[in-house]
């Protein structure tokens, strides 16, 4: 059974940093891409970043490129999102999600709230 559990959200001032974690089970990073997706208050889902560990590749939305870094630790079955230079517009619930080719994102974590405010 595929499971994803996020943690690490919180309140941070503009310009600050946070690191989100997502512990996964039921699959390995060597066999699957994994993504971070966020939803700001009153808005739809926004893809943030993906990692293809089996190909050593990453991809980022333009809105976070250069500020966020996605990574994995296979020994800990954990996905990370390091977020630097945070802005108020980064305020959102952040989800880790596992895609399946042709099916979109059928697997989601419960989400973790990130609030960027002074």
Image: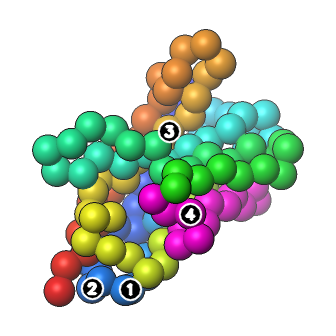
Q: Quadrant of the N terminus?
A: top right
- Sequence-wise, the earlier of marks 1 and 3 is 1
Q: Helix, strand or loop at disc 4?
A: loop
- Sequence-wise, the earlier of marks 3 and 2 is 2
- Crowding around mark 3 (Cα neighbors within 10 Å: few <14, some 14 to 19, many 20+) is many
Residue nearer the viewer, 74 or 89 = 89
Pinpoint residue 64: horizontal percent, then vertical percent: 49, 62
- Residue at 55% from the left image edge and 15% from the top image edge: 103
Q: Magenta span has 70?
A: yes
Q: Is residue 91 above or below residue 32?
A: below
- Sequence-wise, the earlier of marks 1 and 4 is 1
Q: Which mark is residue 65?
A: 4
Do tag 2 and tag 4 residues touch (Cβ < 8 Å)?
Answer: no
Pinpoint residue 79: horizontal percent, then vertical percent: 60, 56
Tell me the mark number nearer the camera, choosing from 3 and 2. Answer: 2
* Label 2 – label 1 distance at C-alpha: 5 Å
Pinpoint residue 118: horizontal percent, then vertical percent: 17, 86
- Residue at 68% from the left image edge and 38% from the top image edge: 33
**Quadrant in which residue 80 is drawn:** bottom right
* Label 1 – label 4 distance at C-alpha: 16 Å
Q: Which residue is mark 2?
A: 13
* Label 3 – label 4 distance at C-alpha: 19 Å
Residue range (magenta): 63-75
Q: Magenta span has 32?
A: no
Q: Which residue is mark 1?
A: 16
Q: Which residue is mark 3?
A: 97
Residue 24 visible to the viewer: no
- Crowding around mark 1 (Cα neighbors within 10 Å: few <14, some 14 to 19, many 20+) is some
* Label 3 – label 2 distance at C-alpha: 26 Å
Tell me the mark number nearer the camera, choosing from 1 and 3. Answer: 1
Q: Helix, strand or loop at disc 2?
A: loop
Residue nearer the viewer, 102 or 87 = 87
């Amino acid at each position: 059974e595929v499971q994803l559990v996020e943690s690490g959200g919180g309140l941070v001032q503009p310009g600050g940093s946070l690191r989100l974690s997502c512990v996964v089970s039921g699959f390995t990073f060597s066999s699957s891409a994994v993504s971070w997706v966020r939803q700001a208050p009153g808005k739809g889902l926004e893809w943030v970043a993906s990692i293809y560990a089996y190909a050593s590749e990453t991809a980022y939305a333009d809105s976070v490129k250069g500020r966020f870094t996605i990574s994995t630790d296979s020994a800990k079955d954990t996905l990370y999102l390091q977020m630097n230079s945070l802005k108020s517009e980064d305020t959102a619930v952040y989800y880790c999600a596992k895609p399946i080719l042709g099916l979109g994102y059928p697997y989601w974590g419960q989400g973790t709230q990130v609030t960027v405010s002074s």
